[in-house]
């Protein structure tokens, strides 16, 4: 009997592809956001409002993942930026190979911003690196303020938490301060932005956050 | 939900490693899972067993090593397991402790049986 030490990541094949993608994004100065949330938190609506507001000369593309239907891609395609639906047919998350395959359908011209809308799920998507610059977790006020404690991985690995649907705050018992404190207890460094895609409140802060990170990506020296 | 995919990745890694040891059979694989890896341990165990059964890896045991989330204190050097999400250092009350582990999803080792070793050492 012989014990062979391996010390290998279980998802090393995913991580290898993600590493190649990250290298390519870095060389092309593309800022990539991997948006994660539970179903119905308003990811697609937030992306719609984002695409609507972004300058038309910005090179933006969107990949949107769902188990079935191309409903989201059809919604997002109305803003004259390239959009592709990734239909996972049962798989509960996007993985790096799906991103690689989807990108192969497009030209290799550099992008400024790639928005990835993951499958609605706060668990599995957190395990899969897609080569993104950062994960963004979206939590809506119709969910519980204790979601960061129940699904710590998603909040721990995200750079930003968007608290969405704030226009509904008068009608739901959601405690904003509690949600913020819970997120910070998991990840003290997490940025927090409150938005309402219906009233438009907070969207300027969200867009400014993206803009600031776009400039960081552009300023990054090529390797 | 994604434990089947993870189980499949573990077994693929075992198969890849086995190609380096012709004639050997894998008897055990060790997998390290952090509390925050987003993996349900019992579900992963079930998926591994289901994939191993009647496969080329029949007989392979899977040892799952569950690791709690731990933080370290940059001020006093104390390392501690996180309970109830409290990240404050229990020794010096420093609030800015840093994560040391708890998101592991690693294959730590593989045990091989070369079919010749009967347990006694060679003369």
Image (cartoon, coloured by chain):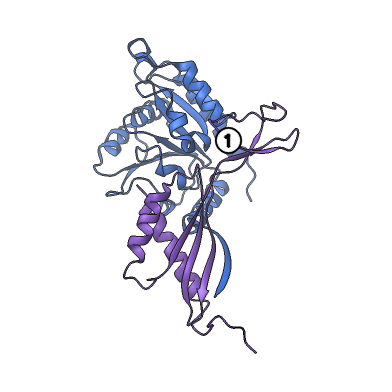
Chain colours: A blue, B purple
Which part of the image, by quadrant, shows the C terminus of chain B? bottom right
Question: A45 or B43, which is in the foreground?
Answer: B43
Looking at the rendering, which quadrant does residue B5 occupy? bottom left
- Image spot of residue A86 (x, y percent): 32, 46
A120 over A17 or under it: above or below? above
Return the residue nearer the eye: A162 or B1.
Answer: B1
Task: Answer left or right for B97 relative to B15.
Answer: right
Q: Is residue A45 above or below residue A61?
A: above
Q: Is residue A208 visible?
A: no
Residue position marked by numbered label 1 in the rendering:
B82
Residue drawn at 41 percent across, 55 percent down: B6
In the rendered image, residue A99, in percent from the top left (x then y), is placed at 41, 50
Task: Identify the element where label 1 is drawn.
Answer: loop
**Extreme-front residue of the structure:** B120
**Residue B69 in sight from this viewpoint:** yes
Q: Nearer the viewer, residue A59 or B38?
A: B38
Residue A103 in the image: x percent, y percent?
Answer: 41, 51
Q: Position of residue A211 (x, y in %)?
A: 53, 29
């Amino acid at each position: 009997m012989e014990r062979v030490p391996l010390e290998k990541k279980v998802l090393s094949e995913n991580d290898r592809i993600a590493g190649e993608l990250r290298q390519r994004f870095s060389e092309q100065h593309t800022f990539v956001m991997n948006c994660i949330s539970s179903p119905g938190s308003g990811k697609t609506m937030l992306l719609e409002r984002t695409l609507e507001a972004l300058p038309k000369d910005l090179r933006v593309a969107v990949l949107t993942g769902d188990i079935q239907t191309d409903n989201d891609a059809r919604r997002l395609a109305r803003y004259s930026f390239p959009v592709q639906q990734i239909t996972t047919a049962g798989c509960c998350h996007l993985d790096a190979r799906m991103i690689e395959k989807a990108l192969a359908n497009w030209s290799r011209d550099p992008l400024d911003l790639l928005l990835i809308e993951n499958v609605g799920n706060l668990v599995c998507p957190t395990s899969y690196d897609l080569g993104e610059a950062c994960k963004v977790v979206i939590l809506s006020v119709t969910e519980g303020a204790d979601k960061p404690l129940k699904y710590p991985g998603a909040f721990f690995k995200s750079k930003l938490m968007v608290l969405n649907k704030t226009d509904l705050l008068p009608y739901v018992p959601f405690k904003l301060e509690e949600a913020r404190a819970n997120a910070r207890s998991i990840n003290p460094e997490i940025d927090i932005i409150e938005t309402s895609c219906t009233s438009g409140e907070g969207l300027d802060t969200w867009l400014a956050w993206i803009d600031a990170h776009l400039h960081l990506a552009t300023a990054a020296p090529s390797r | 939900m994604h434990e089947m995919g993870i189980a499949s990745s573990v077994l693929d890694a075992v198969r890849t490693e086995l190609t380096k040891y012709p004639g050997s059979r894998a008897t055990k694989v060790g997998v390290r899972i952090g509390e925050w890896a987003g993996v349900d341990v019992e579900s992963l165990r079930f998926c591994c067993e289901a994939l191993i059964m009647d496969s080329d890896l029949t007989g392979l045991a899977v040892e799952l090593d569950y690791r709690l989330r731990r933080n370290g204190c940059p001020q006093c050097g104390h390392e501690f397991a996180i309970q109830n999400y409290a990240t404050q250092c229990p020794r010096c009350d420093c609030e800015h402790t840093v994560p040391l582990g708890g998101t592991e999803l690693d294959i730590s080792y593989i045990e091989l049986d070369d079919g010749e070793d009967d347990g006694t050492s060679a003369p």
